[in-house]
Image (tube, coloured by chain):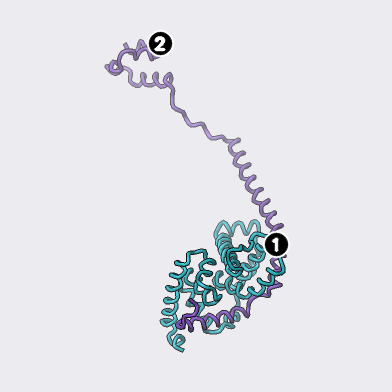
Chain colours: A cyan, B purple
Amino acid sequence: MKDELATQLETLHADAYGWALHCCGHDPSRAEDVLQNAYLKLLQGRAIPSGGSSLKTWWFGVIRFTAKEESRRQRFRDSLPGRMLNRWVALEDLSNDRRPSPARWLELDERARLLRETLAKLSRRQAEVLHLVFYQDLTLSEAAAVMTISIGSARQHYERGKTRLRRLLETLHPAEHHE
Amino acid sequence: MNDDPSDADLKERFAILREQESIHAPNFPRTLARAHAAGKKSSTDGLWRRRSLAAAFIAVVALLGLIHWINPAPEPPGPLGWNEALPIFLETHHGESGLFTSLGAGTDSLLPAHLRFKLF
């Protein structure tokens, strides 16, 4: 990997991890795997930066696609044919429990956890666009490029998501919302 | 879009979430090194996996072939030709009058010679 690209990716690394975490349903071990696989694609030349969009937009698109692939593989592994194949070919070490520890969850600030739980109640697209705009500080057009949808759709998801998020925060935790 | 004043509360919440999650972000050089190592390992694992699946597929095809060779499925009966069907039909309808006069002139020339006398 070229030094300049590596340097740019290093500056994006923490944000990329946050995005991978969002794409993996906030499962830290899966997010690490997805991020690692995304880097692997880059190393193997299977993902090449396109000149059309910014590096961050392109990289987040790769991570999102990689998370979808990993999610499909996980669904197969969890299915009956997948479990039978696992036993026969020993595709992975099933004894490794990868769930985050309770202590890990307690480390999160209460407000951060509340936001995460409320975001989980939104539709996938609404949660994605809100994450990209507010968390990753992208513009709507950049968020639309990452999500591979039109800017009109992105705007619609953004507005509806924002309205619904506020209503949920108000309804579920009125004391928190009015602090 | 990001400068709407009414979004300040949401921005603050997301900023807290971002700060919390970035604490647990894996180390960049370590992640890159693990990706390197995973790349080397996956090419070896993938080869053995493909070989195992190919061997299983060949075994299943060979087994099916062996079963078919030992006990082949019977040939289904095909449609009867004119020479086979007509005697059966005549035996079935022997003695029915008027059955073949409606067929019209020239029909008897279509019949095999040894059957013609049965009609007239």
Q: Residue at x 47, y 29 (%)?
A: B77
Residue B96 visible? The answer is no
Task: Please tell me in which quadrant of the rendered image residue B115 appears.
Answer: top left
- The chain containing the residue under callout 1 comes to B
Q: Nearer the viewer, mark 1 or mark 2?
A: 1
Pick the residue in front: A150 or A66: A150
Query: Which amino acid, mark 1?
Result: Gly
Residue A7 visible? The answer is yes
- Of marks 1 and 2, which one's residue comes earlier in the chain? 1
Pick the residue in front: B109 or A63: A63
Q: Is residue A7 above or below residue B17?
A: above
Query: Which amino acid, mark 2?
Result: Ala
Identify residue for label 1.
B39
Q: Which disc, if any, is residue B14?
A: none
In the structure shown, which secondary structural element does the residue marked by tag 1 occupy?
Answer: helix
Identify residue for label 2.
B113
Q: Is residue A156 above or below residue B68?
A: below
Position in image of residue A144 (x %, y %):
51, 67
Q: Residue at x 64, y 51 (%)?
A: B53
Farthest residue toward the bottom? A179
Task: Please tell me in which quadrant of the rendered image residue B33 appears.
Answer: bottom right
Label 1 neighbour load within 10 Å: few <14, some 14-19, many 20+: some
Pick the residue in front: A38 or A97: A38
Q: Relative to B61, is A151 on the left or the right?
A: left
Report the quarter where the C terminus of chain B lies: top left
Farthest residue toward the front? A52
Position in image of residue B13 (x %, y %):
51, 82
